[in-house]
Amino acid sequence: NAGVTQTPKFRVLKTGQSMTLLCAQDMNHEYMYWYRQDPGMGLRLIHYSVGEGTTAKGEVPDGYNVSRLKKQNFLLGLESAAPSQTSVYFCASSYEDRSGQPQHFGDGTRLSIL
Amino acid sequence: AQKITQTQPGMFVQEKEAVTLDCTYDTSDPSYGLFWYKQPSSGEMIFLIYQGSYDQQNATEGRYSLNFQKARKSANLVISASQLGDSAMYFCAMREGLGTSYDKVIFGPGTSLSVIP
């Protein structure tokens, strides 16, 4: 039972390079989210998706793009990486229902931009 | 404007004592949900407890209880009989826009709890 899998787990980039973070879930969840975690700031929502083919901006979307072409995958792209994007990135997924089902989180991707 | 406020960046508690971690929130949605998560030093996010905005009773899960005061927009986490393993970051989170295109979960900045033997 894999749950939520993030790829890669670690990455070092140079300023200006691009990359894509992959999030895959095997629980048939409708909702998926990308967060970044920085010291003292908790988890901040970057983008989220309420279903296949839909995406929406969160609290800190600038510099990032996302795609949800398949229900089980949610991709986070950095077109031109900046040092301010050095962070730990978490993907999460959840059911659509309103009964208080919690989010399931991946293990995180530690990204450093030099 | 910050929607989730956790005013205690760091807290200390003696082992076996109870501790309350504060959380206040801001939303205009009538239907919303509140979560607490624990993040130990290993980094994983662990779900602790949930409170729905229409729930009549405060949520409880083992040693965790949620002191929900809807009019004050607060959802404080109470941990009873603290254990050394409770030392971690604790995050309050709110789900709003339930069932709409903007259904999302946002987090507060967190409180670091240290349990002293």
Image: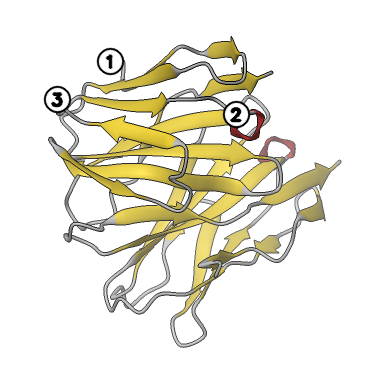
The three-letter code of the residue at mark 3 reads Lys
* Residue placed under numbered mark 1 in the picture: A1
Which circle's residue, 3 or 2, is located before the other in the chain? 3
* Residue placed under numbered mark 3 in the picture: A70
Q: Position of residue A40 (x, y in %)?
A: 71, 48
> Residue at (50%, 65%) from the top-left corner?
B66
Q: Is residue B92 above or below residue A35?
A: below
Q: How is the image coloured?
A: secondary structure
The chain holding disc 2 is A
Q: Secondary structure at mark 3?
A: loop
Q: Secondary structure at mark 2?
A: loop
| Label of residue A82 in the image | 2
> Residue at (70%, 66%) from the top-left corner?
B7
C-alpha span from label 3 to label 2: 28 Å
The three-letter code of the residue at mark 2 reads Ala
Tell whether label 1 touches label 2 (CB within 8 Å).
Answer: no
> Residue at (31%, 15%) from the top-left corner?
A2
C-alpha span from label 1 to label 3: 19 Å
Q: Secondary structure at mark 1?
A: loop
Label 1 Cα crowd, 10 Å radius (few <14 / some 14-19 / many 20+): few
Say whether residue B91 is left or right of residue A67: right
> Residue at (78%, 53%) from the top-left corner?
B10
The three-letter code of the residue at mark 1 reads Asn
> Image quarter for residue B6?
bottom right
Which circle's residue, 2 or 1, is located before the other in the chain? 1
Between B91 and B54, the one nearer to me in the picture: B91
